[in-house]
Image (cartoon, rainbow, N blue to C red):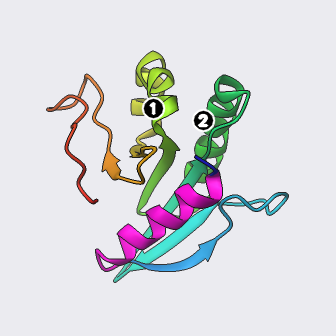
């Protein structure tokens, strides 16, 4: 799934949960900065998205760097990544890094279902039922 589509699904689902999108650069080449910023009351949510490519491993590692910068340089209440299900193996491999970054992880599968990914250190394993469909 392309980054643009992942971003569109994510924004749609979070807006239905009361968030307002104030920035959506997901899938836009050379846009720079945080892909998606949403606000709700006094909360600010920054999200980096990655779609499928021929270099998923490299893209995932780039995503980790972008997320670390996002967390350290912006005053966000929440930060997350939103990725296709093809990145789950990298989430498993780099679970300690993801936990250290304090990232929420959202997955959009090939059918367009959106759900939260839970790593092995959390109370639940990967939840097969989407939070949103």
Viewer can see residue 117: yes
- Residue 85 on image: x %, y %: 45, 36
Q: Label 2, label 1: how many angstroms apart (C-alpha)?
A: 8 Å
The secondary structure that dominates the magenta segment is helix
Residue at point 32%, 77% (across, down): 16
- Residue 87 on image: x %, y %: 51, 30
Residue at the extreme top of the image, as rendered:
93
Placement of 116 over or under 14, stated as above or below: above
Badge 2 vs badge 1, beta-carbon distance below 8 Å:
yes
In the picture, measured across the screen, residue 67 lies left or right of residue 38, that is: right
Residue at the extreme right of the image, as rendered:
30
Question: Label 2 neighbourhood size at 10 Å, few (<14), some (14-19), many (20+)?
Answer: some
On residue 98, the disc is 1
Q: Nearer the viewer, residue 76 or 39?
A: 39
Q: Quadrant of the C terminus?
A: bottom left
Residue 98, quarter of the rendered image:
top left
Q: Nearer the viewer, residue 88 or 5?
A: 5
* Residue identified by numbered label 2: 64
Range shown magenta: 3-18
Label 2 or label 1, whichever comes before in sequence order: 2
Residue at point 54%, 69% (across, down): 37
């Amino acid at each position: 799934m392309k980054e643009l589509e992942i971003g569109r699904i994510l924004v749609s689902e979070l807006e239905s949960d009361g968030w307002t999108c104030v920035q959506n650069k997901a899938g836009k080449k050379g846009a720079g900065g945080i892909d998606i910023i949403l606000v709700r009351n006094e909360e600010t949510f920054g999200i980096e998205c990655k779609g499928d490519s021929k270099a998923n491993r490299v893209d995932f590692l780039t995503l980790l760097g972008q997320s670390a910068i996002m967390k350290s340089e912006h005053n966000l209440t929440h930060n997350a990544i939103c990725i296709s299900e093809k990145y789950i193996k990298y989430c498993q491999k780099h679970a300690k890094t993801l936990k250290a970054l304090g990232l929420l992880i959202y997955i959009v599968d090939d059918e367009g279902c959106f759900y939260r990914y839970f790593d092995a250190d959390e109370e639940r394993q990967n939840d097969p039922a989407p939070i949103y469909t």
